[in-house]
Image (tube, rainbow, N blue to C red):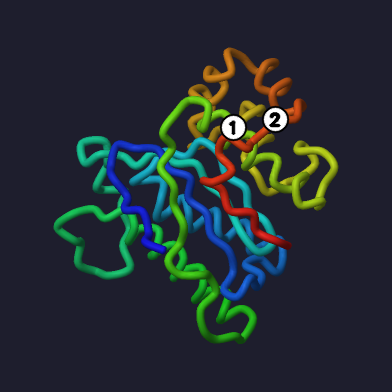
Amino acid sequence: MKTEPFVKGNYYHVYNRGNNSGDLFFEEDNYRYFLKLYKKYIDPVADTFAWCLMRNHFHLLVYLKEDHEINHEELTFSTIEKPKEINHSKQFSHLFNAYTQAINKRFNRTGSLFEKPFERKKVTSEDYFSNLIFYIHNNPVHHGVKKRIQDYPWSSYDILLSEKPTTLKRERVISFYDDVNNFVYYHNTQHDCETIRDLLMDYEL
């Protein structure tokens, strides 16, 4: 199946799972370290609207910045020499490679950690956007890990409701639902995601 190319200035659902459906996160510090690397490699080139890290997979909703929106001084690469053109796909690869190296060292393992290539789907409508944010935050409930969205610690849901500093596009997400109350109400109501089912991949835990 051909991988959809990244096009700057567009929104994407980015997701992937462990190689052979194996785990990606083995202890709590792994989640924190992945987010630290995400801030390092992805924040400079993409705006993030929602995320969820599950034991053996993850989901992200991002906007790929265009060249004039990127602060090149913030960029970090896996090589000393900076490339002539910013490649969003390679930035994600830098993230996954750096995380894999750390996990392999920590747990004395070898080989790939993530499936390749990572999946991405272009977000093409407002309905898709709103359903996708719910789908991402609802993933722990969907997979039976938690009974309530707000009880899962490794998603952007609580961060979007807090007032703590964040690089998440909190105001834009909340404004999409008009206000915080409607955001919470939407997330506490079951939604039919069949309209975007063909654009989603259900990963089994």
Image coordinates of residue 26 in percent, x first then y, are 70, 69
Query: On the rendered structure, is 159 left or right of 112?
Result: right
Camera-side residue: 154 or 79?
154
Quadrant position of residue 54: bottom right
Residue drawn at x 26%, y 48% as measured from the top left: 73
Q: Which residue is mark 1?
A: 131
Q: Is residue 136 above or below residue 97?
A: above
Residue 191 disc label: 2
Which residue appears farthest toward the right when viewing the image? 147
- Give amino acid for label 2: His
Q: Residues within 10 Å of mark 2 (few under 14, many from 20)?
A: few
Q: Is residue 30 above or below residue 71?
A: below
- Give amino acid for label 1: Asn
Q: Is residue 161 above or below residue 144?
A: above
Residue 163 disc label: none
Image coordinates of residue 6 in percent, x first then y, are 32, 50
Q: Residues within 10 Å of mark 1 (few under 14, many from 20)?
A: some
Camera-side residue: 176 or 40?
176
Figure quadrant of the N terminus: bottom left
**Circle 2 — which element?**
loop
Camera-side residue: 20 or 50?
20
Residue drawn at x 51%, y 84% as measured from the top left: 111
Q: CA distance from mark 1 to mark 2?
A: 8 Å
Which residue appears farthest toward the left when viewing the image? 84
Residue drawn at x 58%, y 53% as measured from the top left: 201
Quadrant position of residue 159: top right
Image coordinates of residue 97 in percent, x first then y, are 44, 70
**Circle 1 — which element?**
helix
Quadrant position of residue 182: top right
Mark 2 and mark 1 in contact (Cβ < 8 Å)?
yes
Image coordinates of residue 124 in percent, x first then y, are 41, 33
Residue drawn at x 73%, y 62% as measured from the top left: 205
